[in-house]
Image (tube, helix red, strand yellow):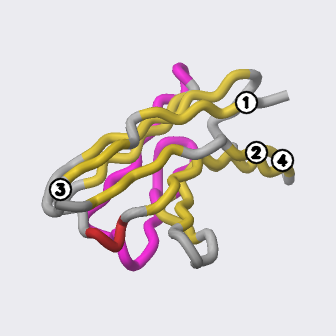
């Protein structure tokens, strides 16, 4: 069984930065995709970024060029560096793992971008 634990959310002003982290317990392999999704109030959950084997990250259109995903397979940890944050980035951010056809989710961490 895999569990995902996120940290790093909080309140930040527009233009600021935050770094989220997610550490997985249980067995996670480098070929398993890890990533971040977010869900704002009244909206559907959307992809923020994902990465497999520490290479070839992909990003949602709304965050491309502002957010960076990285991963340490030995630590079973994925990070999301968020820069130039905007109020529309306000959401609950969920860590995600796709492991051989099974989806695992963290409980989420709230990011609020506001003055």
Residues tagged 4 and 3 counted as in contact (Cβ below 8 A): no
- Secondary structure of the residue carrying tag 4 is loop
Residue 37 position within the rendered picture, expressed as x and y whole percent measured from the top left? 56, 59
From what the image shows, is residue 69 above or below residue 45? above
Q: Foreground: 55 or 82?
A: 82
Q: Earlier in the sequence, mark 4 or mark 3?
A: 3
Task: Confirm or deny contact between disc 1 and disc 2 (CB under 8 A).
Answer: yes
Give percent across and percent down for residue 103: 79, 51
For the point 52% across and 30% down, the residue is: 77
The residue that appears at 65% across and 42% down in the rendered structure is 107
Looking at this rendering, what residue extends furthest in the front direction? 115
Q: CA distance from mark 1 to mark 3?
A: 31 Å
Q: Earlier in the sequence, mark 3 or mark 2?
A: 3
Q: Would you say 18 lies left or right of 26 here?
A: left
**Circle 3 SS class:** loop
* C-alpha span from label 1 to label 4: 15 Å
Marking on residue 13: 3
Checking the image for residue 100, the label placed there is 4
Whole-number angstrom distance, CA of label 4 to CA of label 3:
39 Å
Q: Which residue carries the number 2 mark? A: 104
Q: Circle 2 — which element?
A: strand
**Structural crowding at the residue carrying mark 3, measured as other residues with C-alpha within 10 Å and reported as few (<14), some (14–19) or many (≥20):** some
Label 4 to label 2, Cα distance in Å? 11 Å
Camera-side mark, 3 or 2: 3
**Residues at discs 1 and 3 in contact (Cβ within 8 Å):** no
Q: Nearer the viewer, residue 92 or 65?
A: 92
The mark lying in front, picked from 1 and 3, is 3
> On the image, numbered disc 1 is attached to which residue?
3
Crowding at dot 1, Cα within 10 Å, few <14 / some 14-19 / many 20+, comes out as some
- Which region of the structure is painted magenta? 50-75
């Amino acid at each position: 069984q895999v569990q995902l634990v996120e940290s790093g959310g909080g309140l930040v002003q527009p233009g600021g930065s935050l770094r989220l982290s997610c550490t997985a317990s249980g067995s996670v392999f480098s070929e398993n995709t890890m990533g971040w999704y977010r869900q704002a109030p009244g909206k559907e959950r959307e992809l923020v970024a994902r990465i497999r084997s520490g290479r070839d990250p992909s990003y949602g259109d709304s965050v491309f060029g502002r957010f960076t995903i990285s991963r340490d397979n030995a630590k079973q940890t994925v990070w999301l560096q968020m820069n130039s944050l905007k109020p529309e980035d306000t959401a609950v951010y969920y860590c995600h793992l796709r492991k051989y056809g099974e989806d695992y989710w963290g409980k989420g961490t709230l990011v609020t971008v506001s003055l």
